[in-house]
């Protein structure tokens, strides 16, 4: 008599997602060894498994995730951390007071500053030397309020601007509003907004039912009706859903306002400049 087959569900073939994760890690680090976060790796895996992001930009759409975050973390635990994957960021540090830091850094004027809604995104930009390449301090929204000496350095620049990088979500729009309302300096939203997510064909999530509905007018001012409807339906896209190289190009281009002169800091950033800067595409 032949042995009986084991009861229960059939075994799951984990090889395909493990191979896809290896390809995603290689893509996330291109060109030249870019450092990336765990969530950026997850979204790169989504692009590998469902490569519909390469459609024409004139047709805006977002994509549902083809794999859950849980399955991604299980695959990551099996395969190990790939080169370039950053550790989780440290929690926010207390604001330093005058005299606690002997550095003369604050004696200079800063023409721009970048605030990121997501601490892990801020960590990724710093790990890739964007703060040096763009001559722009990078902070997470959790780090606010700014050190008074940094505020004074921005004031000394004369025409300084605070840029805010946030998700295409109600929470992201609210983050921008909080930063803008807390500072007298000109504050600009870098995105994301829904039209960016649609043009880039990003993977988008959907909030639970109770969170859907009409959004406050003060959060959606300046958005198109279709964007408001997209947000009201519960959809959202994270900055982490943008390919790491594309994100670096877009942020550098925006904060500098120009491609500027070539002042390489690391080989992969030099490669990004040679590939050309990119602003967020719009349909």
Image: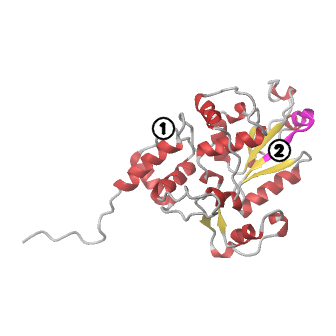
Asked which quadrant contains residue 260, the reply is top right
Task: Report x, y in % for residue 207.
Answer: 63, 69
Crowd tier of the residue under label 2, counting other residues whose Cα lies within 10 Å: few below 14, some 14–19, many 20 or above: many
**Residue at 63% across, 56% down:** 200
Task: Report x, y in % for residue 279.
Answer: 71, 47
Q: CA distance from mark 1 to mark 2?
A: 33 Å
Q: Which residues are magenta?
A: 152-163
Asked which quadrant contains residue 218, the reply is bottom right
Q: Is residue 199 above or below residue 6?
A: above
CB contact under 8 Å: marks 1 and 2: no
Position of the N terminus by quadrant: bottom left
Report helix, strand or loop for mark 1: loop
Magenta segment: does it hold 245? no
Task: Report x, y in % for residue 38.
Answer: 54, 48
Task: Report x, y in % for residue 272.
Answer: 62, 36
Q: How many marks?
A: 2
Q: Which residue in the protein does label 1 denote?
A: 83
Left or right of 138? Residue 197 is left
Q: Which residue in the protein does label 2 denote?
A: 162
Q: Is residue 199 above or below residue 82?
A: below
- Marking on residue 48: none
Residue 93, can we see it? Answer: no
Left or right of 25? Residue 268 is right
**Residue at 69% across, 59% down:** 283
Report helix, strand or loop for mark 2: strand
Q: Is residue 268 above or below residue 168?
A: above
């Amino acid at each position: 008599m032949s042995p009986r087959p084991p009861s229960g569900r059939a075994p799951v073939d984990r090889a395909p997602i493990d191979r896809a994760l290896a390809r995603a890690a290689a893509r996330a680090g291109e060109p030249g060894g870019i450092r990336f976060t765990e969530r950026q790796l997850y979204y790169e895996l989504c692009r590998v498994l469902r490569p519909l992001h390469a459609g024409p930009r004139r047709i805006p759409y977002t994509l549902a995730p083809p794999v859950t975050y849980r399955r991604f973390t299980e695959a990551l635990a099996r395969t190990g951390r790939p080169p370039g994957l950053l550790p989780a960021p440290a929690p926010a540090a207390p604001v330093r007071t005058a005299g606690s830091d002997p550095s003369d850094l604050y004696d200079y004027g800063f023409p721009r500053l970048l605030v990121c809604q997501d601490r892990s995104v801020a960590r990724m930009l710093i790990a890739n030397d964007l703060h040096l390449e763009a001559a722009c301090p990078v902070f997470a929204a959790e780090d606010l309020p700014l050190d008074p000496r940094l505020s004074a350095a921005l004031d000394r620049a004369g025409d300084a601007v605070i840029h805010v990088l946030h998700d295409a979500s109600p929470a992201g729009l609210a983050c921008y509003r909080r930063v803008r309302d807390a500072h007298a300096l000109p504050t600009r939203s870098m995105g994301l907004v829904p039209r960016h997510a649609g043009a880039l064909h990003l993977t988008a999530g959907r909030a639970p039912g109770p969170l859907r509905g009409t959004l406050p007018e003060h959060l959606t001012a300046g958005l198109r009706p279709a964007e408001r409807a997209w947000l009201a339906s519960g959809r959202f896209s994270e900055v982490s859903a943008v390919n790491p190289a594309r994100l670096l190009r877009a942020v550098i281009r925006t904060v500098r306002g120009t491609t500027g002169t070539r002042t390489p800091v690391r080989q992969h950033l030099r490669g990004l400049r040679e590939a050309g800067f990119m602003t967020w595409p719009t349909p």
